[in-house]
Amino acid sequence: DACHLLLDVFAGSAPSQRAGLADASLACVQALLDADETEAAANTLDALKEGSNPAHIRIAAANLLMQLRPENAQEILLDLLRDADQAVSTGALMLARAMPSGIITEALITMLDEVAEDRKPALLEVLGARGDTAALSVTQDHVHHESPDVRRAALRATGQLGNASLTRFLLERASSGPADEQRIAREALTRMPGEEVSARLLDIAKSRGDEEMRVRAIALLTERGAANAAKDIYSLVPTTARTEPAPIRAESVRALRSLAPADMLDAILALCLD
């Protein structure tokens, strides 16, 4: 039929002559798949993903080929990520973002060691967006990178992949360093789900550790809406024995204005008037 004839012409053409047939050939691949001609479809896709074809054709062909040959997905994706055509490598990142396979995570981690510094942030952002916690140790390592862009992307990814065990690590980043990195770490702790995160922040707030970290922990409890922490926070602002530093007391009062339940209203009013 017409599709078989077209694909025969495509296969017999020189690579430099295939671009004009690429769109139609890609459309014909579905006809091959519908006819259970999987091997012929895969061979056509293999030719379509090569460098002589337009970037959008190469990406679409690679996407279908990875579905047909999942055992080759990592190799196919790495080839695209390494491509000199920026449109192809960018398109490969978009593919990787939506593909759940652990093999794809491994491919992205491999690329982090290969690519130039200016391409690392995009890879880290995709690792974070994919949500595969197998990449967590790698993203966390890059939080200490010398490049500010890489550090910011790594912090975002670490916040997306992390859990309560990273509460102190992220709080340290939220309490010191460049302002934009502090903001990213704060946002990560604000969004991170789970009562355990709030519990760990409260433990730090009640500790006798670094004052700035304690103040930041109380502020984050407010941002997280941790109403269950209200009574413990209240203990940090006694009205008689001023045992806590003034910044701790002040931040605790601010937190109670948002978190305290109705049955603590009289106590909060007394603090505000004190």
Image (tube, helix red, strand yellow):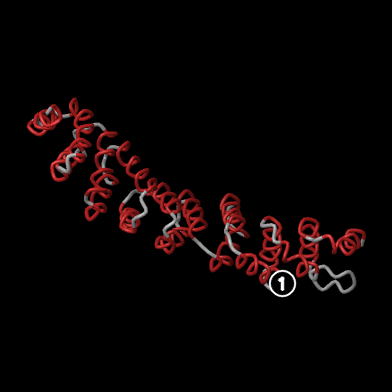
Along the line of sight, the residue nearer the viewer: 206 or 72: 72
Is 230 drawn above or below residue 155 in the view shown? Answer: below
Above or below, 54 relative to 241:
above
Q: Quadrant of the N terminus?
A: top left
Position of residue 72 measured from the top left corner of the image (x, y, whole percent): 22, 53
Q: Which image quarter: residue 219? A: bottom right
- Residue 54 shown left or right of residue 120 in the figure: left
Q: Where residue 35 sits in the image (x, y, percent)?
A: 17, 40
Graded by Cα atoms within 10 Å as few (under 14), some (14 to 19) or many (20 or more), the crowding at tag 1 reads some
Q: How many marks?
A: 1
Closest to the observer, 166 or 260: 260
Q: Residue pushed farthest top? A: 20
Point out residue 152 in the picture as x, y percentages from the top left corner. 50, 51
Across and down, in percent, residue 204 comes to 66, 70
Q: Nearer the viewer, residue 188 or 172?
A: 188
Q: Is residue 260 left or right of residue 105?
A: right
- Can you identify the residue that label 1 sits on? 206
Task: Please name whichever residue, 176 or 77, is drawn nearer the observer in this view of the structure.
Answer: 77
Residue plotted at (39% across, 50% down) = 123
Using the rendered view, name the quadrant where residue 175 is placed.
Answer: bottom right
Instruction: Give the answer, above or below, for where 61 lies relative to 19.
Output: below
Dot 1 amino acid type:
Lys
Residue shown at 26%/53% (left/top)? 74
Q: Residue at x 57, y 58 (%)?
A: 192
Residue at 25 percent across and 31 percent down: it is 54
Above or below: residue 29 compared with residue 183:
above
